[in-house]
Amino acid sequence: MTLEEDVAQWARIEAARRDTSVSRLLGEMLKERMSAQNNYEQAMRRALRRKPFLKSTGRYLTREQVHDRAHLR
């Protein structure tokens, strides 16, 4: 795979602006992306492990029930 010239030029400028190499810049960007994805996946697993906070008979709520906030007060 080859890097498009405009992308490569941006990477060279950004690396120079940060006083680092293109390789290190890309490594840092990939590490940030990996960390963000891992954090998202961990948060999703935690959310899916939680018990539902609304009581239901197993049926979907109607639009009116979903937007009715009077019972929450």
Image (spheres, rainbow, N blue to C red):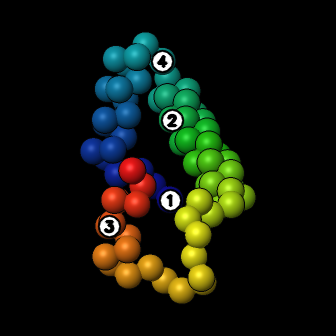
Q: Is residue 64 above or below residue 72?
A: below
Q: Amino acid at mark 1?
A: Met
Mark 4 and mark 1 lie on one chain; the one further toward the N terminus is: 1
Q: Amino acid at mark 2?
A: Met
Mark 3 and mark 1 lie on one chain; the one further toward the N terminus is: 1
Q: Residue at x 38, y 34 (%)?
A: 11
Real-space CA distance between mark 4 and mark 1, rounded to the nearest whole angstrom: 23 Å
Question: Does 73 sit left or right of 39 as displayed?
Answer: left
Q: Residue at x 35, y 51 (%)?
A: 4
Mark 2 and mark 4 lie on one chain; the one further toward the N terminus is: 4
Q: Which mark is residue 1?
A: 1
Real-space CA distance between mark 2 and mark 3, rounded to the nearest whole angstrom: 41 Å
Q: Residue 26, how many percent across, how many down?
A: 51, 35
Element carrying mark 2:
helix
Residue under numbered circle 3:
67
Which label lies toward us, 3 or 1?
Answer: 3
Which label lies toward us, 4 or 1?
Answer: 4
Real-space CA distance between mark 1 and mark 2, rounded to the nearest whole angstrom: 19 Å
Mark 1 and mark 2 lie on one chain; the one further toward the N terminus is: 1
Q: Residue at x 33, y 44 (%)?
A: 7
Element carrying mark 4:
loop
Real-space CA distance between mark 2 and mark 4, rounded to the nearest whole angstrom: 12 Å
Element carrying mark 3:
helix
- Residue furthest to the right in view is 49
Q: Amino acid at mark 4?
A: Thr
Image quadrant where residue 63 sits: bottom left
Q: Residue 54, how many percent across, how many down?
A: 55, 65
Q: Nearer the viewer, residue 17 or 59?
A: 59
Residue under numbered circle 4:
20
Cβ–Cβ below 8 Å for labels 1 and 2?
A: no
